[in-house]
Amino acid sequence: MVIRPLPGRRSLLKGSLALPAGLALPAFTRSGRPSAEWGVQAGDVSRDSALVWVRSDRPARMIVETSATESFRNARRVPGPLLGPGTDFTGTTQLRGLPPGEQIHYRVLLTDPDDPRRTSAPVAGTFRTVPDRRRDGVRFVWSGDLAGQGWGINPAFGGYRIFDAMARLDPDFFLFSGDTVYADGPIAATAELPDGGLWRNITTEEKSKVAETLAEFRGNFRYNLLDEHLRRFNARVPSIVQWDDHEVRNNWYPGQRIADTDNRYTEKSVDVLAARARRAFGEYFPVSTLRPGTREGRIHRVVRRGPLLDVFVLDMRTYRNANSPGDQTADPQGILGREQLEWLKRELARSRAVWKVIAADMPVGLVVPDTTEGRPHVEAVAQGDPGAPLGRELQIAELLRFVKHRRITGTVWLTTDVHHTSAQHYHPERTAFGDFDPFWEFVSGPLNAGAFPATELDRTFGPERVFVKAPDTANVSPVGGYQFFGEVAIDGGSGELTVRLREMDGAVLFRKTLRPGLVGQ
């Protein structure tokens, strides 16, 4: 068996200066024992279970130990899978039978499959299981769009330091709302800044071109884990992850063919690229509905967070129809596909949680154009016509109508994608289509990517932009600011849900509190 060697520190630091304190790369040493220097992650945590992720530097058996304390006295040991090249030496282990509402400490060990005495140093993490009691409340953060537009890990900037600001809030989980990598966005050694200075990236071979092979997609996910802030965050805060377009290619949809004139790609079938990207995505994130090392499973799912919250994770890529002008008067497939839409309606109707967060990887009423094929097509839902629903808006109208007629309360839409932060309130009195209840949509991001001006609002669902912060010019670097994340806190006593839109350092830009149990607010 041939194992590809890990990149040396010299190649990883190409284009960079010395690393400042607090930004250390994995050591990448090849000792006589397995190593887990890419860190650990937990995901899709429930009241009594969780998934734990790790990556080894060689074939190894994964073992997870859990304890109620950091001392790991009376630790419980859970054997995990054998990690090998079939999953790029990644693996997840499901922990079951955990106590609800408790802090769980875990550590991952890797053992040599031929000699169990040869064991890695333990890599520790922690998470809180979902409480049964309402009074404990819920707090989480969300954002997306990491390392886009060529703005990668810059040690002089402090790397992905926004993750430290999110960690300081001690959230119960992180909703990673898509564009978790930019597989179509190469990272060069340097990028020019408006003042004439240089942004200096850490670079790797896989990030030197657009991703086409499975190895290149895997390398995109590994790239972000070179950042110590992200690895430290992963060890402290469990995730709920979804994808959008840049895990594959900008503005992709099923069945798409890449133009022959796009010389960046030798593989012209987007379906082939998406299958490889989906496999790498499932290998590098702990997602309960995916099976690592295969293309099986699905991304859309409900993650139940106790009596106060259910999170409905959407997949607005896999089942969508082709991007078009969006002026169809009938569009049963839409952006979700019929099967996912019916699933979402069923799950919303059966939810007994006070709040129902719809985690959408694209916004509802913000016009996101697609000109990648040389024509003015629609990339998201809205198409700019303020009249009755058309195109993909028809499917969202059907969902909103269902929520109203079933008197489902507590729906809140969270999204990223547009590289600015804003709050939109949708109301039927401001539109010709009035068959829905008022709702809120909150937008955040990017995490470490180019920032862009605010997009046009489509008036079909009567949005009012209550708050927005965005630059006036396109692709503002992280040095220029405009890096954002959002926080949601649900009070265990009153049940009130408060959204705070925050800047990179954690400063609050906007706050909105919603009351529970109301039909539209």
Image (cartoon, rainbow, N blue to C red):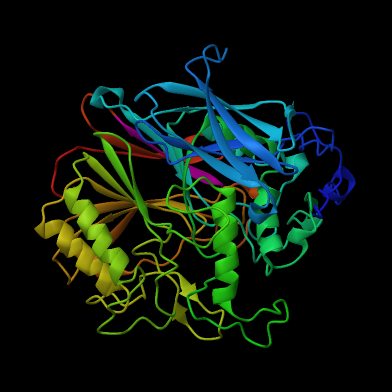
Q: Residue most toward the bottom?
A: 260
User: Is 381 rendered above or below residue 260?
Assistant: above
Q: Is residue 196 covered in magenta? A: no
Residue at coordinates 70% horizontally, 33% vertically from top-left?
Answer: 111
User: Is 496 rendered above or below residue 5?
Assistant: above
Judging depth in this view, the residue of 355 and 33 nearest the camera is 33
Judging depth in this view, the residue of 431 and 231 nearest the camera is 231
The x and y percentages for residue 109 are 65, 29
User: Is 372 rendered above or below residue 492?
Assistant: below
Can residue 482 be seen from the camera position used here? no
Residue at coordinates 14% horizontally, 43% vertically from top-left?
Answer: 518
Q: Is residue 34 left or right of residue 409?
A: right
The quadrant of the rendering that contains the N terminus is: bottom right
The x and y percentages for residue 410 are 21, 45
Number of labelled discs? 0
Magenta segment, prevailing SS (helix, strand or loop) = strand
Query: Which image quadrant is residue 268 in?
Result: bottom right
Q: Is residue 169 left or right of residue 54?
A: left
The x and y percentages for residue 252 are 52, 73
Residue at coordinates 41% horizontally, 65% vertically from top-left?
Answer: 316
Where are the magenta residues, as a range? 483-490
Can residue 485 be seen from the camera position used here? yes
Residue at coordinates 47% horizontally, 61% vertically from top-left?
Answer: 296
The x and y percentages for residue 77 are 54, 25
Judging depth in this view, the residue of 402 and 462 nearest the camera is 402
Q: Residue most toward the right?
A: 10
